[in-house]
Image (spheres, helix red, strand yellow):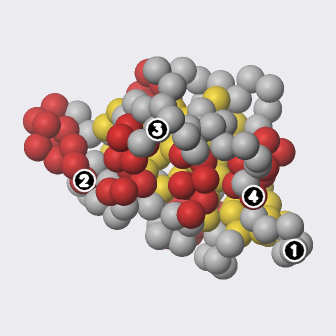
């Protein structure tokens, strides 16, 4: 069902960038931390008719859905992309480019959500928080990057500098990261 005012008439910097980095078979997904940004998480469904899939399971999902990380399949030409761009700087989540379907991607994201330390203690890995991911990705070896990325071809993360985005992809020795401004006036630069 189409919603009124859903399709923007021209490319925003965010949509233009996504068109530039998306492959022909890529699907776009957002992972949004509802605990950090309820508006961004739930506007997807409320304003743009997008479906939300919580990354929590069981009883936890039932009681904590309102603060859970949400996986959201995103249509490139819907206004949600602009809203995402407006919320950069709030450390609310990440964007994923993949050819996986929602079910396979959710299963992968659930698998990397729980990590075990040296003592066997389980913890939630907040990889969908850009502040965490910007620290974690540069430490990955090639095999660690392959395991973490799974079916994702590219992960897009807000940069520490306002108005910039990091495009991260796995490579043989770890993760290759390119940083780019989302405005036409600021030049892009590549970072490792």
| Closer to the camera in the image, 178 or 93 | 93
One can see residue 67 in this view: yes
Q: Neighbour class for label 3 at 10 Å: few (<14), some, many (≥20)?
A: many
Quadrant location, the C terminus: bottom right
Q: Residue at x 15, y 41 (%)?
A: 60
| Closer to the camera in the image, 134 or 77 | 77
Q: Which mark is residue 67?
A: 2
- Which residue was labeled with disc 4? 13
User: Which mark is in front, 3 or 2?
Assistant: 3
Of mark 1 and mark 4, the one earlier in the sequence is 4
Vertical relation: 2 (above or below) 139: above
- Which residue was labeled with disc 3? 48
In the picture, measured across the screen, residue 41 lies left or right of residue 174, that is left
Of mark 2 and mark 4, the one earlier in the sequence is 4
Q: Residue at x 50, y 35 (%)?
A: 4
Of mark 1 and mark 3, the one earlier in the sequence is 3
Of mark 2 and mark 1, the one earlier in the sequence is 2
Find residue 54 and report its horizontal and vertical position in percent: 31, 37
CA gap between label 1 and label 3 equals: 30 Å
């Amino acid at each position: 069902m189409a919603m009124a005012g859903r399709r923007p008439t021209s490319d925003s910097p965010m949509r233009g960038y996504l068109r530039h980095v998306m492959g022909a078979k890529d699907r776009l997904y957002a992972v949004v931390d509802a605990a950090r940004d309820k508006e961004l998480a739930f506007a997807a469904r409320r304003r743009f008719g997008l479906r939300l899939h919580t990354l929590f399971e069981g009883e936890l999902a039932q009681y904590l859905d309102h603060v859970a990380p949400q996986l959201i399949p995103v249509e490139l030409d819907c206004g949600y992309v602009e809203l995402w761009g407006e919320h950069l700087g709030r450390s609310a989540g990440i964007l994923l480019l993949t050819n996986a379907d929602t079910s396979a991607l959710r299963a992968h994201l659930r698998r990397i959500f729980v990590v075990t330390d040296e003592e066997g203690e389980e913890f939630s890995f907040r990889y969908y928080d850009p502040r965490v991911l910007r620290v974690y990705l540069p430490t990955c070896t090639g095999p660690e990057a392959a395991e973490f990325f799974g079916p994702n071809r590219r992960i897009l993360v807000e940069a520490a500098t306002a108005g910039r985005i990091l495009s991260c992809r796995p490579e043989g020795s770890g993760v290759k990261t390119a940083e780019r401004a989302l405005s036409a006036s600021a030049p892009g630069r590549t970072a490792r």
